[in-house]
Image (spheres, rainbow, N blue to C red):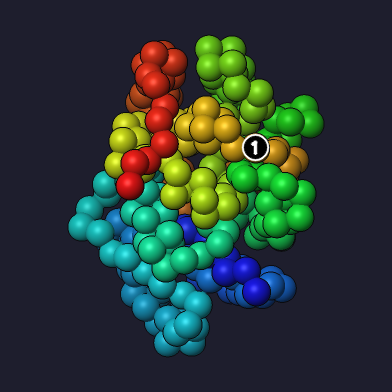
Amino acid sequence: MDRKIIIIPTYNEKENIEKIIRAVFALEGEYHILVIEDGSPDGTAAIVKSLQKEFPERLFMIERQGKLGLGTAYLTGFKWSVDHEYDYIFEMDADFSHNPDDVPRLYKACSEEGADLAIGSRYCNGISVINWPIGRVIMSYYASVYVRTVLGMKVYDTTAGFKCYRRKVLQTIDLDNVRMKGYGFQIEMKYSTYKLGFKIQEVPIIFVDRKEGTSKMSSGIFGEAFWGVLGLKMRKIRPKTV
C-alpha cells in the first residue's frame, strides 16, 4: 500500500486544527499527517499533542521556535517525509480553504494518471474562488498570468498551495537551494518541478476562503513573488547531487 502524508503548517489555528485532522483521517486510504507548528501562542500545539494520543501511528508534529515562514515549514516537512519514505507527499492548509474531500483526487492524478505533481487548481477551469474580496481574486489570478508569461510554464494556478508530489520529485529538487520563503516558494517549487522534466497536472478545485482564524496573507508576500520570479527566470535549475 502506498504511504501518503499530508503536511499542514500551522500558526494560530486552534479553531481549525482538530477539525481538519479528523476530516483527513475520515478519508478512505489511510493518510498520515505531519503538522509543522511555528510556536503558536494560541495553544494549537497542545491540541495536536492531545490528538496524537488518539492517533499515535498517523499524526506527527514538528514544533519550531517562532514564525519562520511557509516555505521553510514545507521544506522541513518535505525532508522529514522523504526520510520516512512516504510515496506521496501533500501540501494542505489547516483552514479548510482546501477541501479534504479533494485529497483523493490529487492522489489519483499521481497514482493512476501519471502525474509527478498534482495541483489543486483554482484557475484551470475559469476562476473557482469563494468568499474572497474581488481585489484579492484579481491580484491572485493575474499573478498567475504574470508567472506563466515570464517563466513559460503552462500552469494556470502558479501560487496554489494544495498539491501532491511523488517522492522522487522532492528527492530530485535541491531543497537546500530553494530561495523563496513566502508564497513565492510555491512558484519556485512548481518551476523547479517543470524544469527538471516532471509531469505536472492541474486538478480543478473550488477554493473557499477560511471561515475561522486569521489569514496570513500580506502585500509583502506578493512583492517577494513578483521580484523573485524575475530572478528565477535567470537561474539554472539543476537536480540535487548526491
Q: Is residue 202 left or right of residue 91?
A: right
| Nearest the eye: 222 or 241 | 241
Can residue 89 be seen by looking at this rendering? yes
Residue type of the residue flagged with mark 1: Ile
Q: Which quadrant does the N terminus fall into?
A: bottom right
Can residue 226 be seen by looking at this rendering? no
Q: Is residue 134 left or right of residue 53?
A: right
Residue at 50% over, 77% down: 58
Q: Residues within 10 Å of mark 1 (few under 14, many from 20)?
A: many
Above or below, 45 relative to 220: below
- The residue indicated by pointer 1 is 200
List x then y, in percent, for residue 164.
59, 51
Above or below, 233 relative to 11: above
Residue 4's quadrant in the figure?
Answer: bottom right
Q: Is residue 148 left or right of residue 53?
A: right
Task: Looking at this view, name the residue that lies furthest to the left.
Answer: 65
Residue at 22% over, 53% down: 66
Residue 216's quadrant in the figure?
Answer: top left
Residue 53's quadrant in the figure?
Answer: bottom left
| Nearest the eye: 2 or 160 | 2
| Nearest the eye: 132 or 66 | 66
Residue at 41% over, 54% down: 78
Task: Looking at this view, name the residue that lies furthest to the bottom.
Answer: 53
List x then y, in percent, for residue 236.
39, 21
